[in-house]
Amino acid sequence: MTPSRTAFAAILGKDLRAELRTLQSLPAMALFAITSFVIFRFGLNRTHLSGSLAAGVLWATLLFAAVLGINRLFVAEREEGGFDAIRLAPIDRSVLFTAKVAALIVYLAALELIAVPIFALFFLSSAASLAPLIIVLVLADIGLAAAGTLISSMAVNSRARDLLVPLVLLPLVVPLMIAATAATEPLMLLGGVSYHRFGTWLMVLGLYDLIFALLGYAVFDFLLED
Amino acid sequence: MYGKGLRTLSIATVIAFAITLSLVFFYAPIEADQGFLQKIFYLHVPLAIISLCGFIVGGIFAVLHLRRDDPRYDAYSYVSIHISVIFAVGALLTGSIWAKGSWGHWWVWNEPTLVSFLIVFLLYATYYPFRYAIEDRQRQARYASVFAITAGAFVPLNFLAVRASASLVHPRVFATAEGGLPGSMMVTFLCAIGSMALLWTTLVKFELSAKSAQGQMKRLRRALDAPTTAATSRIAPEVH
């Protein structure tokens, strides 16, 4: 049996390499996010955003951009026979889950590295909120990646792949979005950065991450059978 | 085999509802604040509670299905969720009527319980297209179980998040729903919950026996080599 750590590194490395060479998800996600900002600028008819409006625009855009990547997360696995190879390989199957979650976190981080500074450039009057925002982004990414990987692995084996991910994932991440926007809102107030109930919301985010990571780890085996 | 005891259960449900309704209309006092309208509470709250419990029960059956690999548990899980979704629609409609009556709006966003319930309902409503999209029967059963477990874990998490988002801003409107009930209201309320639970169980049993009769019919037709005329559902599991 190959040690899990080796298998994890191999799958994650393979995913990142494939993405770097084909660039099939990340540019689309980033482009989608930037275009959404432009649409929000006209949809809301605002050139500056603050408080709850800023948090809402940022998180709605990041979530929908993430859905694009989540949709494609397992497509190569299915089309090129990756699932069969994992089943044949002498490794623990939940390694595939952890590796895919890690890959998705990397994609989301890369997306945010591009989209968040552009968001600040477009709409925010100061960049002071960006430093504490990193904690919120990291915690939300973990939860989004765990829930997204779980749904994506099921959706890819269905007839309605592109439909199923947004359909099932969106209600599932509502608590995550509640916590993420509520934590972001006081950071982006016009009067400067405030940490109103910041800790509470980070705890909700952490709890979400924990539950979905454990859940995904526990049930993933059953998704790979047959 | 699922039909066993169904008649007794149905009669018990009818009697329980007759008792509950007479308690609601003749025994429970008219609430001073909201008047007659408050009586919908005896319908709305049990519907919501039983439907949430049904979602959890569906999740537990899903765990059993994955652990024991017995397709019967998938059928139980499916039927539990199916009936609970119907109850959830009832809870949302009665909640909306109550909101209109007591606050003047068909929908209020600052009542966390109602909003959480809507989100839970939206998630479970995707259970049907989710099942429908997976063609292979065994895989469909397995994936549906994973869905039911995930959604079951999601229910408390969602209530926590929505409650936290409102608790400091708005006062709890339904504070009277817990604790502060006078005795006669409490008795009526418990009766209403009991009869709603009976109704849920009866409906689940009805649905299961109908499904099993359908399955038997199909097998008999196949044995006779007759063409199956009845359209069979692509999402409901077969019951043996």
Image (spheres, coloured by chain):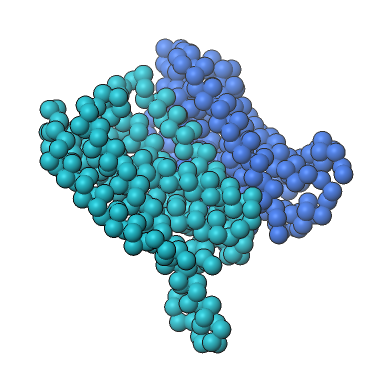
Chain colours: A blue, B cyan
Residue A128 place in picture, x, y as percent: 54, 15
Picture residue at 55% right of the left edge, 82% below the top: B222
Picture residue at 61% right of the left edge, 58% below the top: B70
User: Between B42 and A148, which is closer to the camera in this rendering?
Assistant: B42
A132 over A84 or under it: above or below: above
Q: Residue furthest bottom?
A: B225
User: Between B206 and A223, which is closer to the camera in this rendering?
Assistant: B206
Left or right: where B126 falls relative to A101: left
Q: Is residue B137 visible?
A: yes
B46 over A198 or under it: above or below: below
B175 over B124 or under it: above or below: above
Q: Specify the quadrant that holds the N terminus of chain A.
A: top right
Q: Specify the quadrant that holds the C terminus of chain A.
A: bottom right
Q: Is residue A16 visible?
A: no
Picture residue at 16% right of the left edge, 35% below the top: B28
Residue A153 place in picture, x, y as percent: 64, 50
Q: Quadrant of residue B113?
A: top left
Left or right: where B107 falls relative to A222: left
Picture residue at 36% right of the left edge, 40% below the top: B49
